Image: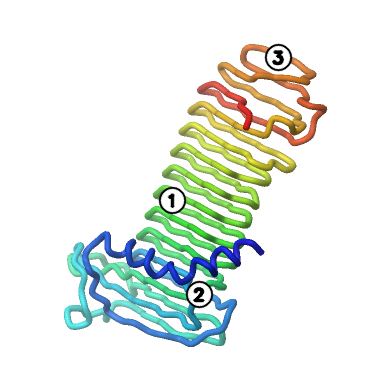
Amino acid sequence: METLKKIISRATGIAIVTAAILSTGNVQAQYRTEQFSVSDDVEVDVKTSGGSIEVYGDNRDEVVVEMYVTRRGKELDADDTDLKDWEIKIEKQGNKVYAYAKREGRSWGRDNFSISFKVYTPVKATTELRTSGGSIELGNLIGYQSAKTSGGSIRAEKIGGDVELRTSGGSITINDVEGAVDANTSGGRIKAEDITGGITAKTSGGSIDLEGVSGNIEAKTSGGSIDVEALDPKDFIELRTSGGSISVTVPKDRGYDIDLDGNRVRADLENFKGEYERDEIEGTLNGGGTKLYAKTSGGSVNLRYL
């Protein structure tokens, strides 16, 4: 698997990349750190109700979990913190590592804390990440990855496997995935580059920008434009928006069954059979093949070629 080779070859350098990412802010005060010896194909399960989650793969045979506590924007260490109202669990069971932080009760006051986790794991790892109050970042991993947040953005990079990403309050950024991507947000933009297993991208409040995608493509938004570059389309490309324009770029020599509908439709068509009107094009291109559907109620549709 090409991603495995690429990710392992970069594993030595990931510590440098990670350090650069972390150094963009102030030095953080670690509240707690745990280390667990594991084998490949480790499972990482992280849940917190008030902070961010970061998971990075590296060339190692252990999982390191770092826990950080913040109150009113200030990072605290163990001497400054009383977590009596929290249930904390950081442990290993079999080849699965858990990191949980759950607030007991529903009270929110001036002294309430936000608990975040950073996890360093072997490259071959699957993840299940959940937070209700922060962003999620994950990268340099091989295996199925799942990340969900109610209050922040999500970034996934250098993943060899299928990816499922959900957020109710932020953008989603994806780069370099050999696998299928399922990305859904209610409140932000979706941007993806270099996806080889196809993508489903849905947002209610932003634009969708997909570059260098192979496989099936489904993109839907209620509040923005859609821009797609399909390098190697398979069965279908389905694009819908009610609040912007659509631009789709595909290989010129492929066959397509096309159905384009907008306020204005623009396409340079050769070997086309069907109907071509100012606001709609329907027919076959190069004898037919991949279903290419694009519809907008609030903008134009542009078909371009690689």
What residue is drawn where x is 57% and y is 16%? 264
Rendering coords of residue 195 (x, y %) = 59, 50
The amino acid pointed to by label 2 is Val
Work out which quarter of the rendered image holds the C terminus and state it: top right
Res. 189 image quadrant? top left
Decide: few, some or many residues near mark 1? Use Cα within 10 Å; few <14, some 14-19, many ≥20: some
The amino acid pointed to by label 1 is Ser
- The disc, 1 or 3, on the residue closer to the chain's N-terminal end is 1
What residue is drawn where x is 55% and y is 61%? 159
Q: Tell me the residue that label 1 is attached to.
A: 168
- The disc, 3 or 2, on the residue closer to the chain's N-terminal end is 2
The amino acid pointed to by label 3 is Tyr
User: Which circle marks residue 33 in the picture?
Assistant: none
Q: Tell me the residue that label 3 is attached to.
A: 276
What residue is drawn where x is 31% and y is 70%? 115
Q: CA distance from mark 2 to mark 1?
A: 23 Å
